[in-house]
Image: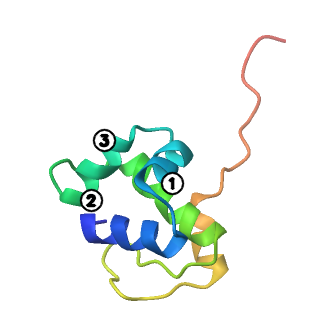
């Protein structure tokens, strides 16, 4: 995910940097740095951006497929899987 993609997503949502930052749990300065390309976007934040796009019905390219739109089922990889219960009996 590149800096242009973050900006395009934010503009498609019609959100400010502050609003996107609040949704992701980061500061607005962090979003600005991602958009300028001065800081790399961590993988967990990139996954959140993909899910955010899917939640709002915005076609969003995944790494390696720039410009490709995905069907709603394409985001199944990000859904949490059930975990086995671990602990004392």
* Most foreground residue, 44 or 15: 15
Instruction: Kindly identify the residue that appears in the image at 78 percent across and 11 percent down.
Output: 88
The image shows residue 5 at horizontal and vertical percentages of 33, 71
**SS class of the residue under badge 1?**
helix
The Cα–Cα distance between marks 3 and 1, rounded to whole angstroms, is: 17 Å
The image shows residue 45 at horizontal and vertical percentages of 42, 49
**SS class of the residue under badge 3?**
helix
Say which mark, if any, is on residue 34: none
The Cα–Cα distance between marks 2 and 3, rounded to whole angstroms, is: 10 Å
In the rendered image, the vertical position of residue 43 relative to residue 11, given as above or below: above
Instruction: Kindly identify the residue that appears in the image at 18 percent across and 57 percent down.
Output: 37
* Most foreground residue, 27 or 60: 27
Q: Which residue is mark 1?
A: 48
In the rendered image, the vertical position of residue 43 relative to residue 29, given as above or below: below
Q: Which residue is mark 3?
A: 29
Instruction: Kindly identify the residue that appears in the image at 31 percent across and 41 percent down.
Output: 29
The image shows residue 68 at horizontal and vertical percentages of 42, 88
């Amino acid at each position: 995910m590149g800096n242009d993609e973050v900006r395009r997503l934010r503009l498609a949502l019609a959100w400010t940097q502050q609003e996107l930052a609040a949704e992701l749990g980061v500061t607005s300065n962090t979003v600005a740095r991602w958009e300028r390309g001065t800081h790399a976007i961590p993988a967990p934040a990139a996954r959140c951006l993909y899910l955010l796009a899917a939640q709002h019905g915005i076609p969003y390219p995944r790494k390696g497929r720039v410009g490709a739109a995905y069907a709603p089922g394409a985001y199944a990889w990000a859904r949490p899987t059930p975990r086995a219960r671990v602990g004392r009996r």
